Amino acid sequence: DARVTQTPRHKVTEMGQEVTMRCQPILGHNTVFWYRQTMMQGLELLAYFRNRAPLDDSGMPKDRFSAEMPDATLATLKIQPSEPRDSAVYFCASGLGGPNYGYTFGSGTRLTVV
Amino acid sequence: GNSVTQMEGPVTLSEEAFLTINCTYTATGYPSLFWYVQYPGEGLQLLLKATKADDKGSNKGFEATYRKETTSFHLEKGSVQVSDSAVYFCALSPNNSGGSNYKLTFGKGTLLTVNP
């Protein structure tokens, strides 16, 4: 089965450090999402790309977060500087877009900022 | 804006019991509706979907019917197993033709625990 690959699976970093999370979407998928999952807030949409163009990043704290798709096989989410409140599981999902399709999620990056 | 409301968990059942997890939504127009499942330590997996009113999505013994009149998409299973223990998320995606905003809006999730 095709899968969305996220790296790293786990990351522990100190407050103030830069964190980069990577996602390899399924080949041929033109839509990519970044979600953050915490116990308190549930699943929050951070960024949404279609054909590598950002469509919606309204859920992302702009002062410290940035999301890019340098090419169709790579999506990145960066946090600089990181803070303890950023501790969460970050999921990438990809799909074909459109109302009739679900999306395939990666296994997530569990980030702990100490 | 769009929103999804799920029954709060946790839900604890014995094996072979009947399962219902309620989900209602608020959206403009007629969205597509989904149920995702998340097993411990894993990402979300699409369980089933329905893209128009009265559609029934089904998979692995789970079913959900798109009810436009009650704006609901309740998840059911006739006989749960221990292996069904997971968190279940209801979600919607806009269905606006010609548009490009198909982002998923999720409910908060319902934890299901099935005991042997």
Image: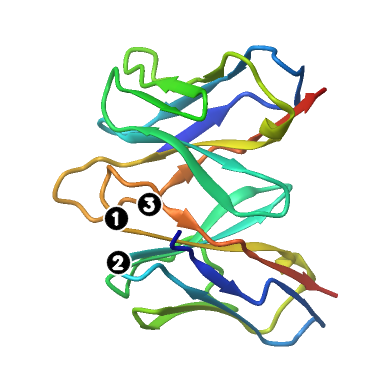
Placement of A41 over or under B10, stated as above or below: below
Residue at image location 45% in from the left, 44% down from the top = B105
Question: In which quadrant of the rendered view does residue A37 lie?
Answer: bottom right
Question: Which residue bears the numbered disc 2?
Answer: A30
Question: Which residue bears the numbered disc 1?
Answer: A97
Where's the C terminus of chain A, which quadrant? bottom right
B50, A34: nearer the viewer: B50
Check disc 2 and give the amino acid type: Asn
Residue at image location 68% in from the left, 84% down from the top = A81
Do pointers 2 and 3 mark residues of a single chain? Answer: no
- Say few, some or many: other residues with alpha carbon within 10 Å of mark 1 (under 14 / 14 to 19 / 20 or more): many
Do pointers 1 and 3 mark residues of a single chain? Answer: no
Element type where label 1 sits in the image? loop
Check disc 3 and give the amino acid type: Lys
Element type where label 3 sits in the image? loop
Question: Which residue bears the numbered disc 3?
Answer: B103
For discs 2 and 3, the disc positioned in front in the rendered view: 2
Residue at image location 66% in from the left, 48% down from the top = A41
Alpha-carbon span between mark 1 and mark 2: 7 Å
Looking at the picture, how far across and down is residue B1, in whole percent? 39, 40
For discs 1 and 3, the disc positioned in front in the rendered view: 1
Question: In which quadrant of the rendered view does residue B51 lie?
Answer: top left
Looking at the picture, how far across and down is residue B5, in whole percent? 54, 29
| Whether label 1 touches label 2, CB < 8 Å | yes
B40, A22: nearer the viewer: B40
Looking at the picture, how far across and down is residue B38, in whole percent? 62, 44
